[in-house]
Every structure is written in structure tokens, then in C-alpha cells.
Image (cartoon, rainbow, N blue to C red):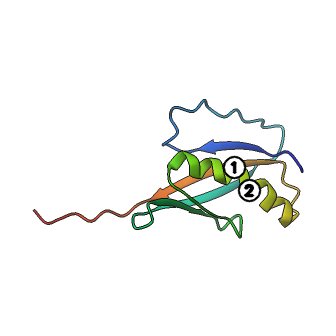
């Protein structure tokens, strides 16, 4: 299995150490669209940049961990020869507000 370096970009991960970019290599940006499913109580992550990626997890951090776990194999199947990936997570949730 090929090793893949990940750089995370998300406002919700303020407690994580900053990822260090190595600008001597080309980085492939991948946008991860995450949304909270209130009925199932899980985060669902998909990506147009990584067709076939569908991850469900009960917390934001476990969703990120699962994406990082499955993405290298998914990209290897795509045979792009990607060595370094920059992940950007875009979160979405819907709230109903009662009229006051």
C-alpha cells in the first residue's frame, strides 16, 4: 500500500496541531462535504473529488478519522498515483427554529 500524507483544513479542529505542508511536492486538494443527519445521529461524508467515498460516523472527529482511513485505498483503486492530499472539510447542518 502506498503511503499518503494528509493535510487537514477545518475550523472545527482547533485543538489539532497544524499540518505542515511540504511545498516541494504537488498536493492534490480534495473537498469533503460533511452533513449531520439528525434522524440517524451521524455525520455523513462524501466527495465529488473522490467518487465512491461515503462515510458515516457518530462524531465529527470519528468521521474525519474514518475518511483518513478509507481514502488512501479508494484513491489507489482510482490509480491516480496521488502521493500527498490536502483535505478540506465543509460541514453542513440544518436547524429548525420555532417562531417566537
Q: Residues within 10 Å of mark 2 (few under 14, many from 20)?
A: some
Find residue 33 and report its horizontal and vertical position in percent. 56, 61
81 left or right of 11 in image: right
Find residue 1 and report its horizontal and vertical position in percent. 89, 51
Tell me which residue sits at (48%, 56%) in the image. 91
Q: Is residue 52 above or below residue 84?
A: below
Between residue 30 and residue 43, name the one nearer to us: 43
Between residue 1 and residue 93, name the one nearer to us: 1
Q: Are marks 1 and 2 in contact (CB under 8 Å)?
A: yes
91 left or right of 9 in image: left
Q: Which residue is mark 2?
A: 71
Label ID, residue 68 = 1
Q: Is residue 15 above or below residue 54?
A: above
Label ID, residue 77 = none
Number of marks in the image?
Answer: 2
Tell me which residue sits at (57%, 33%) in the image. 16
Q: Quadrant of residue 76?
A: bottom right
Amino acid at each position: 500500500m502506498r503511503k499518503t500524507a494528509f493535510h487537514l483544513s477545518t475550523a472545527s479542529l482547533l485543538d489539532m496541531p497544524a499540518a505542515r505542508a511540504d511545498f516541494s511536492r504537488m498536493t492534490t486538494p480534495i473537498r469533503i462535504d460533511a452533513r449531520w443527519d439528525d434522524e440517524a445521529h451521524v455525520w455523513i461524508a462524501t466527495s465529488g473529488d473522490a467518487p465512491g467515498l461515503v462515510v458515516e460516523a457518530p462524531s465529527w472527529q470519528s468521521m474525519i478519522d474514518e475518511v483518513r482511513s478509507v481514502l488512501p485505498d479508494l484513491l489507489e483503486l482510482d490509480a491516480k498515483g496521488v502521493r500527498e492530499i490536502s483535505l478540506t472539510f465543509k460541514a453542513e447542518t440544518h436547524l429548525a427554529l420555532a417562531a417566537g
